């Protein structure tokens, strides 16, 4: 069967395009049914100024705007520069804002894992974490809507976005500290698995059970991540990166911290990390339904979490209907 050219395009909204930066970083297409068009046709080329784009959109009679699928990375890079404007735009629904923010965050985290030493990527991770917080404070539906976009397939970069969203939501639900602390927590949650970039893919993506030696290698990623991020992020963020695999009963790694020696921020990140891992498809197991995941955490992971925060997490998930 021949593929329609429409299947090579992705629809975008007028508001998204008009909220963009000074110049298009991708070609923009439209369909004008009044002219008998049935397939997307070029409206504005890459490099067109925002003023010219706005004029073209206002003058053209069209039903939809499109970008090519292969230009989606460029589109979300374009959107990333304008997230503040997009989030504040009352004409854009929560779902659309969430879609843009989530995809921008995933793109940023993919770039971070490809080049974690880049100062620019560190700034971008800070910018994304700030926008997640801003969106969540501005719109009560933001966190549930962002979580509804979570991929059921595990990728390190989307897992990190999910953990940041879960973590920010629970952190706010509990009311842990100051706005500045929340900013540092959010960036730490986004970067919590950055040390996995030093682990071989054949170990990270192994479909079967890890050998004892392979698991020892996996257990090095919190320390590697903290060493990599030292001097680039705050001590609070480093705490999340280093301690997100600790357990309340001291059975975790890398330092076997227990009880009060674990910070409240780490305790929240631990819950978010475990829950997202359980509810996404992994190379070695299928995703669990939310209720099944919570039951497993309650009955099979006794001692892993501080009871008070686990109860708060259950209440938070119930509130968000995830």
Image: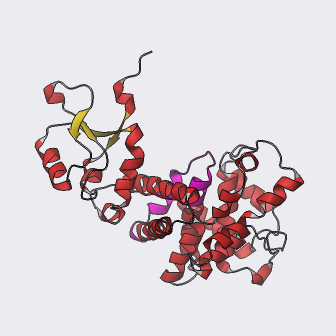
**Which residue corresponds to the image point at 29% horizontal and 47% vertical from the top-left?**
13
Tell me the chief SS of the magenta region.
helix
The outermost residue toward the left is 59
Res. 18 image quadrant: bottom left
Residue 313 place in picture, x, y as percent: 64, 67
Direction from residue 14 to residue 4 in the image, left or right: right
Residue 150 in sight? yes
Q: In this orientation, which residue lies closer to the viewer: 16 or 169? A: 16
Is 269 situated left or right of 46 in this image?
A: right
Task: Examine the structure image and report whether residue 172 is included in the region drawn in magenta.
Answer: no
In the image, residue 84 lies at what x, y percent? 34, 66
Name the residue: 40% across, 38% down.
69
Quadrant for the N terminus in the image: top left
Q: Quadrant of the C terminus?
A: bottom right
- In this rendering, the answer to whether 23 lies above or below 232 is above
Which contiguous range is marked in magenta?
Answer: 137-161
Question: Which residue is painted at 87% across and 50% down in the image?
Answer: 211
Q: Locate residue 224 relative to residue 176 in the image: left or right.
A: right
Q: Is residue 303 left or right of residue 184?
A: right
- Pick whichever, 194 or 269, lies toward us: 194
């Amino acid at each position: 069967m021949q593929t329609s050219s429409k299947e090579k395009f992705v629809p975008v909204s007028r508001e998204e395009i008009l909220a963009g930066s000074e110049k298009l970083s991708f070609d923009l297409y439209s369909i004008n049914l009044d002219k008998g068009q049935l397939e997307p046709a070029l409206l504005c080329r890459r490099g067109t100024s925002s003023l010219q784009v706005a004029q073209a959109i206002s003058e053209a009679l069209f039903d939809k705007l499109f970008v090519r699928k292969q230009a989606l990375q460029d589109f979300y890079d374009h959107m990333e520069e304008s997230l503040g404007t997009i989030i504040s735009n009352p004409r854009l629904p929560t779902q659309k804002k969430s879609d843009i923010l989530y995809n921008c965050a995933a793109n940023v985290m993919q770039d971070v894992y490809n080049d974690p030493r880049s100062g620019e990527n560190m700034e971008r991770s800070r910018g994304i974490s700030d926008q997640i917080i801003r969106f969540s404070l501005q719109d009560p539906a933001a966190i549930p809507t962002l979580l509804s976009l979570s991929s059921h397939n595990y990728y390190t970069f989307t897992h990190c976005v999910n953990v940041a969203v879960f973590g920010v939501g629970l952190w706010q639900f509990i009311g842990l500290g100051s706005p500045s602390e929340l900013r540092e927590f959010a960036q730490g949650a986004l970067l919590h698995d950055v040390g996995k970039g030093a682990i071989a893919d054949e170990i990270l993506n192994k479909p079967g059970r890890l050998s004892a030696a392979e698991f020892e290698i996996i257990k090095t990623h919190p320390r590697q991540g903290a060493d990599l991020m030292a001097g680039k992020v705050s001590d609070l963020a480093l705490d999340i990166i280093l301690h997100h695999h600790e357990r309340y009963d001291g059975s975790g790694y890398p330092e076997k911290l227990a009880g009060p020696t674990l910070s409240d921020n780490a305790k929240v990140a631990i819950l978010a990390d475990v829950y997202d891992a359980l509810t996404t498809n992994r190379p070695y197991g299928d995703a669990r339904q939310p209720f099944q995941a919570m039951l497993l955490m309650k009955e099979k992971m006794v001692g892993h979490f501080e009871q008070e925060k686990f109860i708060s997490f259950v209440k938070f998930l119930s509130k968000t209907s995830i």
